[in-house]
Image (cartoon, helix red, strand yellow):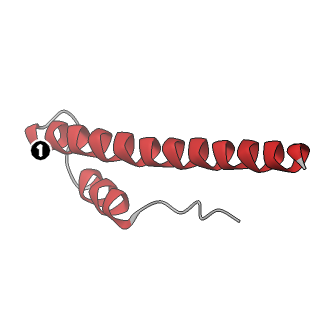
Amino acid sequence: MQNNTIPKDIIKIQQKLATFEKDSRNYKKYTKILAKHIKSFSMKKRVNSHIKTIETVEKISEEQEK
């Protein structure tokens, strides 16, 4: 099975963000940082998913050639 846990860095940023007042300077700053981390995390998951799909297709095509 695939590990679907949220990375610790994202959780730490969310906890820090929860301590700030909404629309404050630090709140906006940490919101941008969090968005960047989430984007990179989702891209890593997407790439891994594509790689697994390609490997599966190659495996099936090899089995059909035999």
Q: Residue at horizontal 71%, vertical 66%?
A: 1
Tell me the residue at 35%/56% (across/down).
Answer: 10
Q: Count up the numbered dots.
A: 1
Left or right, 4 with reference to 13: right
* Picture quadrant where residue 7 is located: bottom left
Q: Position of residue 12 (x, y in %)?
A: 30, 63
Q: Residue at x 77, y 50 (%)?
A: 59
Instruction: Name the residue nearer the viewer: 53 or 37.
Output: 53
Q: Compare residues 54 and 15 and report the one nearer the observer.
A: 54
Q: Position of residue 9 (x, y in %)?
A: 31, 62
* Residue 35, placed above or below residue 16: above
State whether residue 11 is above or below residue 20.
Answer: below
Task: Relative to 2, say whether 24 is above or below.
Answer: above
Q: Nearer the viewer, residue 31 or 41?
A: 41
Q: Nearer the viewer, residue 41 or 58?
A: 58
Crowd band around label 1 with a 10 angstrom C-alpha radius: few (<14), some (14–19), many (20+): some
As drawn, which residue projects farthest toward the front? 66
Q: Is residue 56 left or right of residue 51?
A: right
Residue beneath the point at 67% across and 43% down: 53
| Residue furthest left as drawn | 25
Q: Which residue is mark 1?
A: 26
**Would residue 25 be found to the left or right of residue 37 on screen?**
left
Q: Secondary structure at mark 1?
A: helix
Q: Give x and y (percent) for residue 33.
A: 22, 44
Q: Position of residue 17 (x, y in %)?
A: 26, 51
Q: Amino acid at mark 1?
A: Asn
